[in-house]
Image (cartoon, rainbow, N blue to C red):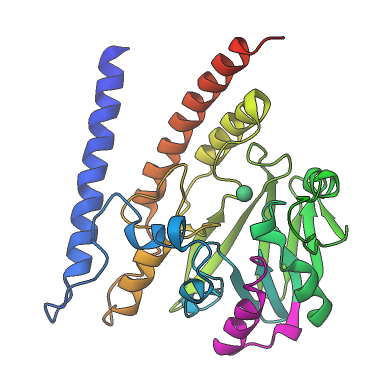
């Protein structure tokens, strides 16, 4: 058993070194130009600046939108992702950010050349305000269907408003997704999974993205960090294990540029966006990175187990 663990650890260490080498090589550039984000860093140094002290700095958060693949654009503020998926029959939006960033999201969609009125579906990865807070407004202007898993519609409907803040606009129950549902719009197909643990109805999405005639397997893990005590922790362990079983994921379509519970190895979204912006013809797309994905999933699985143990200990200490 011990030999196996050691072999596994060695394997992980090797993968990490390979990951570091790969990003360092990719980051050198042919003109000797250096990147501002530390290449090969295990942290999400740039992405991290969008939380913490800058979390409420509205102007700082308004980052320019960027194209990642032919059919995937980032149109969110810096701290929370909003993904635009253009299809041959209209647009799909994954998450919406929240006020006061919804105008920025709408402007960003226009800036990358699309009409927000053409949005057919708004998919909400989980019913936390930073992800769904713009859905009602974007639905109004587009007539799009707002889709969530049943458990998160319930969770949203039962979440009490913060008495110290003006009540935010929340979407009204619309399209209810179920485990295993698929969505086809034009040339795009998505497969949905119910992966609770962050919220009761966190939604994961499998779909393909394209560039230069090539197809890559993309995945959105809708609630990539445990919440909700022992029950949430247990669900999260199961969700993490399910994610680990999905073969061949090449592109992480993350719900935040940074992932506070488990940082994404070799750079978060915004570090990769910088590398992408400096890419020379023939260079690989830095978002295609199954090695970092596999490292990340391992980290999530281990973290999920550790979190569950801690939650159990906390619960045991609590007077009944
Ligand atoms: Zn959340």
Residue sitting at x 64%, y 72%: 100
Q: Position of 218 compared to 18: left or right?
A: right
User: Looking at the image, how many numbered discs can be counted on the residues?
Assistant: 0
x and y percent of residue 110 in the render? Answer: 61, 88
x and y percent of residue 209 in the render? Answer: 53, 68
In the rendered view, would you say 237 is above or below 31? Answer: above
Residue sitting at x 35%, y 55%: 44
Q: Which residues are magenta?
A: 96-119
x and y percent of residue 246 in the render? Answer: 54, 43
Image quadrant occupied by the C terminus: top right
Q: Position of 95 compared to 152: left or right?
A: left
Q: Position of 114 compared to 53: left or right?
A: right
x and y percent of residue 51 in the render? Answer: 47, 57
In the rendered view, would you say 268 is above or below 121? Answer: above
Single out the residue that lies furthest toward the left: 32
Quadrant in the picture for residue 168: bottom right
Single out the residue that lies furthest toward the front: 164
Q: Is residue 318 magenta?
A: no
Q: Position of 46 compared to 158: left or right?
A: left
Q: Nearer the viewer, residue 57 or 158?
A: 57
Q: Is residue 98 magenta?
A: yes
In the rendered view, would you say 158 is above or below 77? Answer: above
Quadrant in the picture for residue 21: bottom left
Image quadrant occupied by the N terminus: top left
Q: Nearer the viewer, residue 88 or 320?
A: 320
């Amino acid at each position: 058993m011990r030999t196996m663990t050691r072999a596994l650890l060695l394997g992980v260490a090797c993968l990490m070194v390979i990951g570091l080498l790969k990003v360092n090589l990719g980051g050198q550039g042919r003109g000797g130009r250096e990147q501002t984000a530390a290449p090969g860093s295990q942290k999400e140094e740039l992405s991290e600046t969008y939380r913490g002290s800058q979390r409420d700095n509205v102007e700082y958060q308004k980052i320019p939108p960027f194209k990642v693949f032919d059919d995937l654009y980032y149109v969110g503020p810096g701290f929370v992702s909003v993904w635009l998926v253009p299809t041959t029959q209209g647009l799909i939006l994954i998450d919406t950010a929240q006020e006061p960033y919804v105008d920025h999201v709408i402007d960003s969609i226009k800036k990358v050349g699309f009409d927000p009125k053409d949005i057919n579906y708004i998919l909400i990865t989980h019913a936390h305000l930073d992800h769904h807070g713009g859905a009602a407004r974007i639905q109004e202007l587009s007539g799009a269907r707002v889709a969530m898993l049943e458990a998160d519609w319930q969770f949203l409907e039962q979440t009490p408003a913060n008495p110290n803040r003006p009540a935010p606009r929340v979407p009204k129950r619309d399209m209810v997704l179920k485990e295993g549902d698929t969505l086809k719009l034009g040339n795009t197909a998505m497969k949905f999974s119910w992966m609770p643990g962050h919220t009761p109805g966190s939604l994961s999405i499998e779909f393909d993205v394209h560039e230069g005639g090539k197809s890559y397997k993309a995945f959105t893990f809708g609630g990539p960090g445990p919440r909700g005590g022992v029950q949430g922790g247990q669900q999260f362990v199961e969700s993490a294990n399910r994610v680990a079983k999905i073969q061949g994921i090449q592109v992480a379509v993350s719900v935040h540029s940074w992932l506070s519970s488990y940082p994404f190895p070799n750079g978060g979204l915004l570090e990769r966006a910088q590398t992408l912006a400096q890419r020379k013809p023939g260079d690989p797309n830095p978002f295609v990175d199954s090695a970092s994905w596999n490292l990340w999933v391992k980290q999530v699985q281990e973290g999920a187990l550790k979190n569950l143990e801690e939650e159990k200990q906390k619960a045991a200490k609590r007077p009944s």
